Image: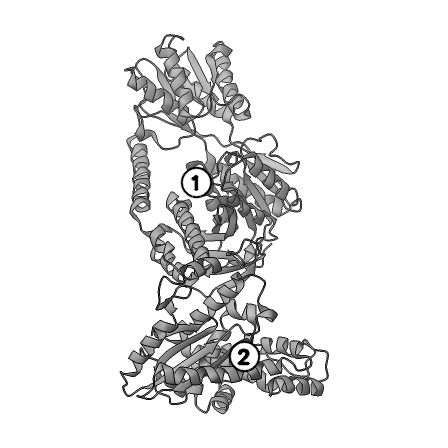
Amino acid sequence: MSKSNRYIIGVIASQLSDIEQSELLSGMLRQAQERNIDLLFLSNIYNPNDPANTIERENDIYDLILSDAFDGLILFSETILNTTQQKLIVEHLSHMTHVPLIALGTPQPGFVLEHFQFLNTSDALDFERITDHLIEKHGFTNMEMLTGFDFIEASHQRVAGYRASLERHGLPYDPDKVHFGNFWMNSGAELAESYIKKDRPFPQAVLCGNDYMAYGMLDTLAKNGISVPDRITITGYEYIQERIYHYPILTTYQRNRAQLGAEAIRLMQQQLDGHPGTDFTPPPGRLIPGDSCQCGLDPAQLLAEQERISLKRTDYFLNLFGQLEFELTECRTIPDLLQVCRKYRYMLRHAEEVYLCLYEDWYNDRAVSETVTCYSLLAQEEPFTIQKHDLERFCSGSAAAYSFSPLFSLQRSLGYAVMKFHTPAANTPLYRHWLKAVSNGLEFLRLKNDIQYLTQCCNLSESVDNMTDMYSKRGFHSAFDAAVETFDARKVHLVVLRVCLFDESYATEGSGQKIQALLAASDAVKCFCAGSRLYGRVEENTFACVVRADTADSRLLADLLGAILLRAVGYTRCYGTDSFVCTAQLCTPNSTYQTEMPKALQELDQLTRISAARRTCSHYREMLALRNQFYLTPEVFFETDSTGLPCSYSSGHLRTIYKACFGVNPHQDCIKGRILLARYLLFTTQDSIQQIAQQCGYRDSKYFLRQFRLHTGMTPVEYRRACSLTDT
C-alpha cells in the first residue's frame, strides 16, 4: 500500500476519451472513490493499428507499468490492437507477477499471460437478449446477422447468443444467414447492396455486431429509398452515441461497461485485502430503442446524446480556431511555454491539476533520462524533480484519478503529462489536442535552443539575443545609455553576472546541457530585475542588467543576484555553486556603457582568477561537495563534528582544509548559505520573517534576526526595503 495508506491501482488503456473507455472509467471512478483508492491511467493518444506507424514513441508511456507504485494493474485489453504494442505491454506485465492483474474484455491471441484474470460483459448473453427482443416484441422469425472479423472471438460469441435465442424459441439456425464483416461501415453497406440488388432476399431484420456496421446499412438503404423499419429492421450494438448522424435513429444495445469497471475495482480490492473473490457475473446491458425498429426512440435518451454531440462540436470549434499551436511556437523558454499552456487552461476541462513532466535530457537525441522535472500548470506550485517511475509522488490529498499521457515528437520521447481528475468527462478530445500541441511546442522550443539553429539565426536581430530573448551586447549598449539619462531619486546600479565557469568540470559533453544552464541563468537575471526588461547577454557566458534601488550599496545587489542563481536548479545541477561570479557598481549621471562595462568585466576577471586559484587547493572537490550542501540545502543543520558530514576528517583538520579552499570555516559558510536563502525569500516572496526563519532552518526567529543583521548590516525588513527594485 502507498505512503498515503491508500491502494494505487494502475490502469493500462488507450485513447481514454473514446466512448467505450469513458463508460469503463465512470464505473471505476465511482467505485474507487467509494473505496478510497487512487487510479493511475497509462494511455497513449493516437493508438494506430498500423504496426509500422511513425508515432511509436507515444507507446513509451507504457514503460511506466514497471513503477513500484502500483498495488494492482487493470488492462483494457480490447482497446489495444497494435500487435507490436501488445508485445511491449505483455513484456512489461510479465515482470509484474508480484501484483494482481485483471484484464477487461475478450482475450486476444498473444495478448494474455497466465496470471491474468479476465472480466467482461457477455457478448453472447447480450445478443441473446437482442434476438429475444426481436422475436418476442416484434414477432420476427426470419433474421440474419452481420458480425465482425471471423478470426476474432468476440465475433463468434455474438453469433452464439443469436443462435441460442433462435433455438430456445424453436426457430432454426441457418449458418448462411450469418455474415462476417470488419466492424466498419463498408461491411454494412455491402450487405445492404446485396439485398437491394436481389442477390439475397430481404429478411425481416438484421442484427449488426456493432453500430458502425449498422450505420453502413442504414445509410445505403436510405440512399436507395428502402424504408426502415417498414421493409427491414436494423439493430446495432455497443451504443457509440452517434445516432443523430444517420437515418432513421438506430435501435442499439449498450453493454454495461460502467458496471464492468466497478466490478474490476471491487474484485481488485478483494485480492489486495487477501480475500480473492470469484463471485463475478457478467453485468447485463440494456436495449436503447430507436426508429430502426417499431419501438420508437426515447426523447430523453436522444436529448442526452445531442448534448454530448454539441459539446464535441464546441471542442472541434475550439480546436480549429484556437491559437494555442501558434503561440507555443513563439516560446523561447520553458516558463514562456508554461505561461501559454496556462492561458489555454479552458482546454483542460474538469482537470483539477495538470503537470508537464519533462525528461532531464528531453532536448537531446540521447536515450531517455530516468530523471523527470515536473511543472505545475493550474496550482502553479514550484517545479519538482522525481525519478521517472516515481508515480506515487502525484497521489496527494483525497483519492483521485490521474491520467498519464505521452509527450513526444516522432522518434523522440519528451516526457509525459499528468492530469488529476474525478470525472471521465476530463478526458476529452480537446485534451488530446492540447497534448499534441504541447508536444509540438516543445519540439519547436528544442529546435530554437539547438546550437546549430542558433548559429544560423544569430544574425536575424542585431539588438536581441535569440536564445534568451534578452538584449544582445549591441542592444544592451544602447538601452544602458538611454536609461542612465533618466535619473531620479533612486540609485541606478549596473549588475554583471558571469556563469558557466570551468566548463570542463561540470558541463556534460554536448551543447544541450550548457544551453539549458544559460537559460536558467537568464531566468534568474529576469527574476532579479523584478519587472524591468533592461537586461542583456553581453558575452557568451555574461549577463548584465540595470536596476534602480534605494540602497547605495551595490554589493548588496550582487549578493542578491547570486542568491537567486543558487535557487535555479537547472543551473546548479549542471555547474555547481563555484561556477559563477557577480559584481555590481553604482552609476552616475555621466556613466556610459563604454565607461562602466569595462570596469565591471575587469572585476569579473579578477574574481574568476580567485575562484580558479581556489580550485588548485588540496581536497577542493570534496570541500566543494560539502559547500554545495551548505548552499543548496541550507535549511539542513550541519555541525563540523557531525558523523553525518560527507568527509572522513577530524573536525579541526576539516576546518583547516575548508578555510584554505574558501577563506571561511564550514560553520560560518553554513550560516552564509542560510542567509543567502533568506535574501532570496525576502526578495521573491511576501512571507513573514518568522516563516522565512523556519524555511532557513532557524527554530528561533530572534536568533535568525541577530545572524541576519550580523551578516548584512541590516534587519530583514530593512533589507527587503533596500532591495525593492523598480523599472529603469
Question: Does dot 1 land on a helix, a strand or a loop?
Answer: helix
Number of marks in the rendered image: 2
Give the CA distance from mark 1 to mark 2: 48 Å
Could you tell me residue 307's position as x and y percent? 30, 39
Could you tell me residue 462's position as x and y percent? 35, 67
Closer-to-camera residue (190/290): 190
* Mark 2 burial class by Cα count in 10 Å: few <14, some 14-19, many 20+: some
Residue named by callout 1:
22
Q: Amino acid at mark 2?
A: Gly
Q: Residue at x 54, y 25 (%)?
A: 152
Could you tell me residue 387's position as x and y percent? 58, 58
Q: Are marks 1 and 2 in contact (CB under 8 Å)?
A: no
Q: Amino acid at mark 1?
A: Ser
Closer-to-camera residue (287/149): 149
Q: Quadrant of the N terminus?
A: bottom right
Q: Give the image quarter of residue 212.
A: top left
Closer-to-camera residue (552/614): 614
Residue named by callout 2:
697
- In this rendering, would 143 be left or right of 82? left
Q: Quadrant of the C terminus?
A: bottom left
- In this rendering, would 135 be left or right of 517? left
Q: Residue at x 47, y 24 (%)?
A: 182
Question: Does dot 2 land on a helix, a strand or a loop?
Answer: loop
Q: Earlier in the sequence, mark 1 or mark 2?
A: 1
Could you tell me residue 137's position as x and y percent? 37, 18
Instruction: Note whether 444 is above or below 490 in the view shown.
Output: above
Instruction: Note whether 551 is above or below 173 in the view shown.
Output: below
Closer-to-camera residue (247/263): 247
Instruction: Note whether 656 is above or below 289 in the view shown.
Output: below
Q: Is residue 204 visible?
A: no
